[in-house]
Every structure is written in structure tokens, then in C-alpha cells.
Image (spheres, helix red, strand yellow):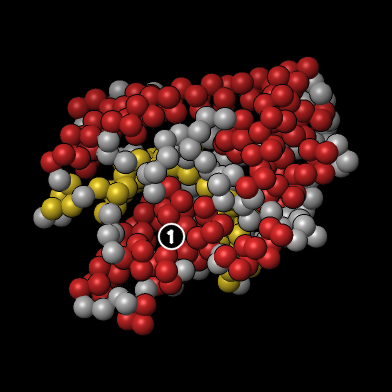
Amino acid sequence: MSSPIIAFFNNKGGVGKTSLVYHLTWMYFDLGLRVVAADLDPQANLTSAFLDENRLEEIWEKEESFNTVFRCVKPLLRGIGDIASPELEVIEDGLNLLIGDLQLSGFEDELSSQWPDCLDGKERAFRVISAFWRLLNQASINSDADVVLVDLGPNLGAINRAALISANYVVVPLSPDLFSLQGLKNLGPTVRRWRGEWQERILKNPAPDLVLPNGDMQPIGYVILQHGVRFDRPVKAFQRWVERIPQVYHADVIQSQEAAFLASSQDPSRLALLKHYQSLMPMAQEARKPIFHLKPADGAIGAHVKAVNNVYWDFKDLAQKIAGRAGLESLFLSQDGL
């Protein structure tokens, strides 16, 4: 059984999605799981969180290996072969990165044009549309991963459609504001439509040897990020949006009326409400490590020490909730820290 693929997606940008994926990647690694972090956002922000500029220049300037997402799909795009096996960047033994690439945006048109061709039963169309899923599975196999976390860009384009079809589960990062709320109203119906359209297409696959993704895209919850805090509660300006999220998420994403009168804190779909970590975030970015790895040598002294510890427990709790919904409990039972 291949490891679960969990996509983090919101069609609105600026909600802290990439930072969330970065921190969860490190948390799962710290908890003893083998992890692949996959950067399918053409802006490659997750990649730049893991790698410094010198390493990025070395990778992007030399095109001698299949070490980025785009280079792995390039033979397929050029019509000279299928996807190449990914050469993952080893961050730590057991933590691997499928490197993002700004050139990935060049794959958008091909993914868009091949989508309708699947209905005509064209094998190449299925190979193109399933390229990300096959790439992520190969990355998982190559690294013996327990879980694959995927960062996506903030749009409803063809790249994200193909990426979401690859995902078993979807987590929605949100900001408590009008824009995220409106974004949810677009995201839910669009994901359902894509799922339905893919189910229709799978039946027309002409190649018995071409294994395709199921297109599960199962929503397992949302995470509210980057809110102001006063006395451990969201400030009043944000609270009204926090309380409206459950109704919209349940109605438009999972098509349920259960949360119509449910307080946000009682919503089972709310995986976490994470603070804006203020000065800790730039400190972590400067040190190129997650917040919960910050040490006094990085500037985490005084009150920061307690704050760093709180961040650890916030992300551990979130990681466990997501893992529970993604069927990873049995792996956790064997880990000493859980």
C-alpha cells in the first residue's frame, strides 16, 4: 500500500500555507515518520524554505539531473518519453524534498489541453494528467516514505487540478477574513466537480498497464492561521470570521448542514487555530529551521523559550489530528514520542 498523499490547498494566497506544510514536514520527521515534502507550487516557496540561495542556484542553473518537479515531467511534455524517476533532495535521513521549479508553470497549458482528451480515451492524455500522481508515488517508493505532504499554489488552474487528483486527502489552510470565506465557496464546488469529472474519465483509460489515481481528494479539515491574539483569544475583529467558517466549510466543502449552529471551537473539522507567531517566524526563517527547533543561539531567549515550546505542542497536536484522519495511527503507535 502506497503512503498517503496529503495536499494543502486554498485558492486564496497569503494564508500561511507554505509555512504550515514546512512545519508539519519537520514535525512528522521529529515524530519518527519518513516524509516527502513535494513542492507543486510554480512559485517554489516551499523549496526556498528548505534550501538556501546557493543550493537553489546550483540546482536551477544546472539541468543535468531529474531533481525538480518540472524536469521529471519534461520528457512527457516534449513527447520524448514518460516521467522520469525523481532525484529527491535529502534534507535529513528520512526527510526528503521533491524540489519545486519556476518552470513548472510551463506545464499548465499541456495539462489543460489534455483534460478533455481523456474523454476520447487517448493514452497520452491519461499519462499527462496522472503525471504528478505517478511522480509522487515514485518519490514515496524511492524514499520509503510514510507520508507525502504537498504544497500547492493559490489558484484553481490545471496544475492544481492534476495535483489534487493525486491527493488522498486535502487540508484547507484559512485566514479568518472575508477573502478566505469567499474562497471556500469557490473551492468546495470546484473540488467536487473535478472529482466527478475524473471519475468519468477513469473509465475511458485505454491502457490496462497504466495505473491511475482514484482522485479521492477527501477533505479532512481546515486550519485557521495568522490571527491576532489577545488574552489567548482571537481579537474581536477576527472572531466574527472565525465563527462563520464552520457553516461555510460544512455547506460548501463537505456538503453537510451539521455546523449550521456550531461554535468554531466545537467544529470537528477545525484541526487547529494557530497563532501568528510574530517575531519567531522571521527568526526561524533566518535560521532556516522550524520555529520549534529554535535555540538560544538563534535568538530564542527569555520569553521566546516558552513560546517556542508552545509552538511545538501546537504542531504536534495538529500533526496527530491530521495523521489520525489519514490512517497513520498504526505508524504512530510504534513511535516513542507519541
| Image quadrant assignment for residue 221 | top left
- 161 or 297: nearer the eye? 297
Secondary element type, mark 1: helix
Query: At 66% from the left edge and 19% from the top edge, which residue is drawn?
Result: 200
Q: Residue furthest right?
A: 80
The image position of residue 120, as x and y in percent, is 78, 17
Q: Provide the residue designation for mark 1.
A: 23
317 w.r.t. 130: above or below? below
The image position of residue 141, as x and y in percent, is 70, 56
Horizontally, is 94 left or right of 21 in the view?
Answer: right
Q: Residues within 10 Å of mark 1 (few under 14, many from 20)?
A: many
Query: At 35% from the left edge and 62% from the top edge, which residue is drawn?
Result: 281
Q: Is residue 5 visible?
A: no
Query: At 75% from the left edge and 30% from the top edge, which residue is drawn?
Result: 126
Horizontally, is 198 left or right of 320 in the view?
Answer: right
Query: At 53% from the left edge and 35% from the top edge, which residue is drawn?
Result: 217
Which quadrant, please, contains the C terminus?
bottom left
Horizontally, is 331 left or right of 57 in the view?
Answer: left
